[in-house]
Image: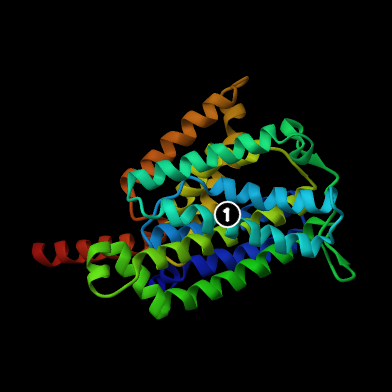
């Protein structure tokens, strides 16, 4: 029974996250789960790029921001229908990914990470210095709620249901993708790009496709974020956000199905718990205490569970086997 629970731990967590808010009907809980859902969509895309294609990106906050700003600018400046603006918010980061991916994906390892880092910083500067188009540091307010036909998503509950339906569909799509011939080819690239090339796999083309797919998902999350918040500014799209996305992917477990969702849950929940807990333990403590403790916990996780939390079931099973073997040897 324990083996089954551990094997499907991600599914169990997802089921709990789907049911509990519907029973409690708490706006705070809905808001928290909407953020987890949006980040999980981003990290699902990043998981394909990092976990299966073996490419590191520190620029995904830029794609997240491009999606959000595309939706915001088109609806507030040009009065596009929200659904059409959301479609543009998905496509525009994908087009940018095509343009920069052709050059950056020729780079390897650290150089690719630095190139995406530079891209993220450049886009953040554009958001901040964009004048009337981006609203500069003040951002854009008055973004309308997302409307699908006559249905206006103007409550946390409605948005929560939409986000998690989208997330479930993405999970099903990714499950089929990683089991396909393309998914196996991506895994081959992750294990050894040289060996994959010798086996006849077009590595550059596949890495570019993974990069575009990842950008499309991130743009979708960005567009939904803009419609949920109805206000955006450059601050959520900094280098710090890109690092958090990478942390979520790594903590959850690279190259695993449930890892991105687990990573998003843990990082967002950890932030919220520390925000409430630290002022109770250290009265008058500032945000720096939260950052220090947050960093210590994340470093400990990386040291003791480098494979990610999705492999924790294997850890308990291997520990149990070791205990049984030790017991047999003693006897």
Quick one: which residue is furthest to the top in this view?
Answer: 284
Q: Name the residue under label 1.
A: 96
Residue 40 coordinates in the image, percent (x, y)? 57, 57
> In the displayed structure, does residue 9 sit left or right of residue 222?
left
Evaluate whether residue 177 shows in this view: yes
Q: Is residue 309 above or below residue 110?
A: below
Name the residue located 33 percent from the left edge and 49 percent from the top edge. Answer: 109
How many marks the image carries: the answer is 1
User: Which class describes the residues within 10 Å of circle 1: few (<14), some (14-19), or many (20+)?
Assistant: some
Residue drawn at x 80%, y 48% is 230
Residue at 22% across / 67% down in the picture? 195
Q: In which quarter of the image is the N terminus?
A: bottom left
281 or 235, nearer to the observer: 235
Out of 20 and 201, give the one closest to the viewer: 201
Q: Is the C terminus in the top left, top right, bottom left or bottom right quadrant?
A: bottom left
Element type at mark 1: helix
Type of colouring:
rainbow
Residue occupying the point 61% across, 66% down: 167
Q: Decide if residue 328 is on the left or right side of residue 86.
A: left
Q: Position of residue 276 (x, y in %)?
A: 63, 35
Task: Using the image, determine if residue 55 lies above or below residue 231.
Answer: below
Drawn side of residue 33 relative to residue 55, left or right: right
Give percent across and percent down for residue 212.
52, 62
**Camera-side residue of 270 and 197:** 197
């Amino acid at each position: 029974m324990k083996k089954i629970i551990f094997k499907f731990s991600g599914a169990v967590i997802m089921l709990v996250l789907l049911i509990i808010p519907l029973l409690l009907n708490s706006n705070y809980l809905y808001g928290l789960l909407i953020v987890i859902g949006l980040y999980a969509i981003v990290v699902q895309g990043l998981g394909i790029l990092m976990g299966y294609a073996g490419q590191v990106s520190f620029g995904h906050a830029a794609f997240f921001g491009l999606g959000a700003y595309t939706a915001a600018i088109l609806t507030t400046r040009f009065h596009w229908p929200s659904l059409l603006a959301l479609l543009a918010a998905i496509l525009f980061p994908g087009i940018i990914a095509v343009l920069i991916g052709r050059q950056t994906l020729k780079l390897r390892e650290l150089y690719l990470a630095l190139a995406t880092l530079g891209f993220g910083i450049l886009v953040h500067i554009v958001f901040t210095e964009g004048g009337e188009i981006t609203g500069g540091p003040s951002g854009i307010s008055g973004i309308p709620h997302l409307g699908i036909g006559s249905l206006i998503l103007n409550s946390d509950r409605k948005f929560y249901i939409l986000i998690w339906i989208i997330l479930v569909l993405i999970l099903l799509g990714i499950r089929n993708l990683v089991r396909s011939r393309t998914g196996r080819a991506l895994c081959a690239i992750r294990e050894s790009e040289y060996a994959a090339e010798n086996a006849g796999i077009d590595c550059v083309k596949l890495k570019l496709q993974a990069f575009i797919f990842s950008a499309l998902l991130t743009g979708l999350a960005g567009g939904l974020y803009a419609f949920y918040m109805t206000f955006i500014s450059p601050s959520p799209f900094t280098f710090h956000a890109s690092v958090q996305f990478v942390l979520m992917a790594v903590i959850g477990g690279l190259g695993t199905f449930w890892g991105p969702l687990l990573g998003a849950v843990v990082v967002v929940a950890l932030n919220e718990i520390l925000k409430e807990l630290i002022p109770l333990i250290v009265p008058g403590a500032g945000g720096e205490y939260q950052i220090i403790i947050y960093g210590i916990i994340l470093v400990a996780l990386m040291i003791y569970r480098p494979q990610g939390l999705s492999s924790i079931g294997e850890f308990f099973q291997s520990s149990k086997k070791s205990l049984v073997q030790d017991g047999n040897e003693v006897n």
